[in-house]
Image (cartoon, grey):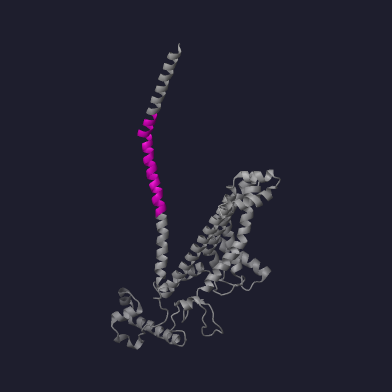
């Protein structure tokens, strides 16, 4: 076979191969991939709308919270007792519709209530009004911002005080005892949980043998599955008794007990994210440090941890948010006394525990109701600002690690 014949055969084979390839590509474009692209399009749009709906729900919750708190923000709420009171003796002289509106009853309830019961309700209200008039602060609108944010010298106190006391003749709505209580518990929780979580994450990701890692990591992450009410009961019954026996605190249930219990629930959050950040550092960093003569601990502490610092900081920020938003543990273990003090061994009260314990006692649309939503919006703002600051710090850390600053 000559050279020309070989060239012709090779050209024919090449043409056949190209034709087969073109047919295969056309079949892939015309057949199954079109179906797959359509399915992928449906799945992609479905994921998009699900994520969009999640964002929409979060925004809807925020709008609802701020809407219910708007009477406080705009100064339209009024806790002063300026309503007209109807004397029991004048009940028969008042039109029924006005009496029903004064008592806050529905037409059905008003029709079903005997006149003697209506008179009894008016007598109770008259007695409460007489007691309230004895208080010099009965005419104060304590929903004003000067009472919410600044100390005030209430009757019976020697100096101006920050007081949250939404019961009694005069409602006191100063929010600083709740903010300080939330911060106290959160600080103790982070001081307890962050060192344990980070050391455990460093050990599991860098130092532990494979089998040990497979045991420790799931056990720590399983702590996230323990209900908060169980941790709260443990703090209430066991931890509080142990601390009371050995440290003799001012109050048996206090910010320290609540903070330690809260730290137990924060540990798996900080550990999981920090361990993922440490594991994601390229192994070449560790190997280069070991090749230069560093021990495993030196390489982990001086090379891997600085490289994973943005992720570790993110873990701490998420742990802060988890601690600030917890309700059941602090409701059971903090003592629920709104004391304005930085003493960690005194009873305290957080924003979340206040909302949980008082929401069922409020009148819908009343000043107490609006005030609880207002402190809920304050909690939202604290969480938003902390996450925003954390994102700013993480961005700066990433730029510094990448050498862009």
Relative horizontal placement of residue 6, taking residue 98 as reference (left or right): right
- Residue 277, horizontal then vertical, whole percent: 57, 51
Q: Is-magenta flag for residue 34?
A: yes
When the figure is inspected, residue 19 is found, relative to residue 348, above or below; the finding is: above
- Residue 181, horizontal then vertical, whole percent: 55, 70
Query: Range of the magenta residues?
Result: 24-52
Q: Which of 225 and 144 is in front in this view?
A: 144
Q: Quadrant of the C terminus?
A: bottom right
Residue at x-position 29% and y-position 79%: 97
Instruction: Name which quarter of the figure residue 119 lies in.
Output: bottom left
- Residue 103, horizontal then vertical, whole percent: 35, 79
Q: Which of 20 and 356 is in front in this view?
A: 20
Residue at x-position 44% and y-position 72%: 371
Q: Is-magenta flag for residue 100?
A: no
Residue at x-position 61% and y-position 59%: 193
Number of numbered discs overlaid on the protein picture? 0
Q: Nearer the viewer, residue 345 or 8?
A: 8
Q: In which quarter of the image is the N terminus?
A: top left
Residue 166 in sight from this viewpoint: no
Residue 293 in sight from this viewpoint: yes
Q: Which residue ends up furthest to the top in the rendered image?
A: 1
Q: Which of 394 and 260 is in front in this view?
A: 394
Residue at x-position 39% and y-position 68%: 67
- Residue 29, horizontal then vertical, whole percent: 37, 34
When the figure is inspected, residue 401 is found, relative to residue 263, above or below; the finding is: above
Q: Magenta stretch mostly in which secondary structure?
A: helix
């Amino acid at each position: 076979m000559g050279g020309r014949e070989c060239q012709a055969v090779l050209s024919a084979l090449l043409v056949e191969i190209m034709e087969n390839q073109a047919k295969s590509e056309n079949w892939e474009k015309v057949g199954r991939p079109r179906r797959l692209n359509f399915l992928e399009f449906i799945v992609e749009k479905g994921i998009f709308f699900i994520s969009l709906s999640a964002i929409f729900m979060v925004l809807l919750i925020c709008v609802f919270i701020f809407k219910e708190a708007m009477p406080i923000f705009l100064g339209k709420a009024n806790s002063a007792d300026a309503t007209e009171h109807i004397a029991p003796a004048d009940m028969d002289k008042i039109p029924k519709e006005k009496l029903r509106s004064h008592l806050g009853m529905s037409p059905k309830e008003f029709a079903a209530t005997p006149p003697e019961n209506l008179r009894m309700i008016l007598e109770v209200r008259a007695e409460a009004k007489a007691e309230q008039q004895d208080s010099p602060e009965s005419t104060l609108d304590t929903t004003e911002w000067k009472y919410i944010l600044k100390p005030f010298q209430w009757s019976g106190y020697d100096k101006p005080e920050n007081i949250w006391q939404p019961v009694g003749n005069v409602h006191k709505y100063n929010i600083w005892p709740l903010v300080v209580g939330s911060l106290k518990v959160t600080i103790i929780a982070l001081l307890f949980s962050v060192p344990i979580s980070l050391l455990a994450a460093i050990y599991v990701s860098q130092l532990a043998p494979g089998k040990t890692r497979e045991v420790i990591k799931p056990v720590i992450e399983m702590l996230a599955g323990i209900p908060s009410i169980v941790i709260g009961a443990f703090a209430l019954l066991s931890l509080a008794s142990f601390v009371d026996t050995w440290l003799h605190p001012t109050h048996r249930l206090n910010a320290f007990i609540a903070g330690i219990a809260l730290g137990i629930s924060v540990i798996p959050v900080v550990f999981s994210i920090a361990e993922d950040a440490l594991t994601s550092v390229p192994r070449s960093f560790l190997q280069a440090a070991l090749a230069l003569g560093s021990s495993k601990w030196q390489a982990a502490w001086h090379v891997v941890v600085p490289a994973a610092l943005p992720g570790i900081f993110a873990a701490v920020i998420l742990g802060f948010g988890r601690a600030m938003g917890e309700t059941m543990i602090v409701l059971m273990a903090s003592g629920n006394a709104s004391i304005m003090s930085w003493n960690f061994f005194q009873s305290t009260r957080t924003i979340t525990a206040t909302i949980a314990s008082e929401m069922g006692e409020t009148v819908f649309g009343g000043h107490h109701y609006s005030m609880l939503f207002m402190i809920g919006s304050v909690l939202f703002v604290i969480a938003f600002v902390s996450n925003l600051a954390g994102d700013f710090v993480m961005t700066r850390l990433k730029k510094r690690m990448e050498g862009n600053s």
